[in-house]
Image (cartoon, rainbow, N blue to C red):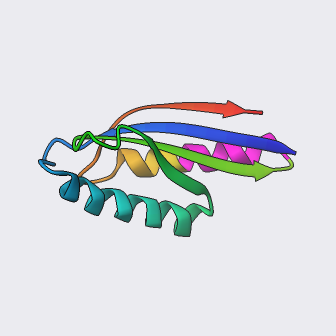
Amino acid sequence: MIVGTLRVRLLLREARTLKDKRQVLQSIKDRLRQSFNVSVAEIEAQDNPRSIVLGLAIVCNEANPIKQTFSEIVNSLKAHPIAEFVDDEMELI
């Protein structure tokens, strides 16, 4: 069993309140869950309206499907119209 984790940082330049952030955040989380079948949660910066830090996890019996899925997720987030992609960190355990 291989567990893959991905930490993604996003920037919301237009968000002024936590309510603005929650709207975008919920949309991103729902889309990632539905499109990629991953576990996703906000793991840091909950009180900062301009910063989103997401933690994603996948369990699989091989590393390649995990790497491919995370690559697709990163590409999807880079193309997001509102949230600006900052960086990502992937780990396989």
At 13% from the left and 47% from the top, the residue drawn is 14
Name the chief secondary structure element in magenta.
Answer: helix
Q: Looking at the image, which is closer to me, 86 or 42?
A: 42
- Looking at the image, the residue that sits furthest to the bottom is 34
Q: Looking at the image, which is closer to me, 78 or 53?
A: 53
**Image quadrant containing the C terminus:** top right
**Image quadrant containing the N terminus:** top right
Is 24 on the left-hand or right-hand side of 13? right
At 28% from the left and 47% from the top, the residue drawn is 83
Q: Is residue 64 above or below residue 88?
A: below
Q: Quadrant of residue 29?
A: bottom left
Q: Is residue 7 above or below residue 59?
A: above
Q: Quadrant of residue 39?
A: bottom right
Q: Position of residue 38 (x, y in %)?
A: 61, 58
Is 66 on the left-hand or right-hand side of 2? left
Q: Position of residue 37 (x, y in %)?
A: 62, 63
Is 51 on the left-hand or right-hand side of 64? left
Q: Which residues are magenta?
A: 62-72
How many discs mark residues in the rendered view?
A: 0
At 45% from the left and 65% from the top, the residue drawn is 31
> Does 74 lie within the magenta span?
no
- Looking at the image, the residue that sits furthest to the front is 47
Q: Looking at the image, which is closer to me, 31 or 23?
A: 23
Q: Position of residue 19 (x, y in %)?
A: 20, 59
At 16% from the left and 41% from the top, the residue drawn is 13
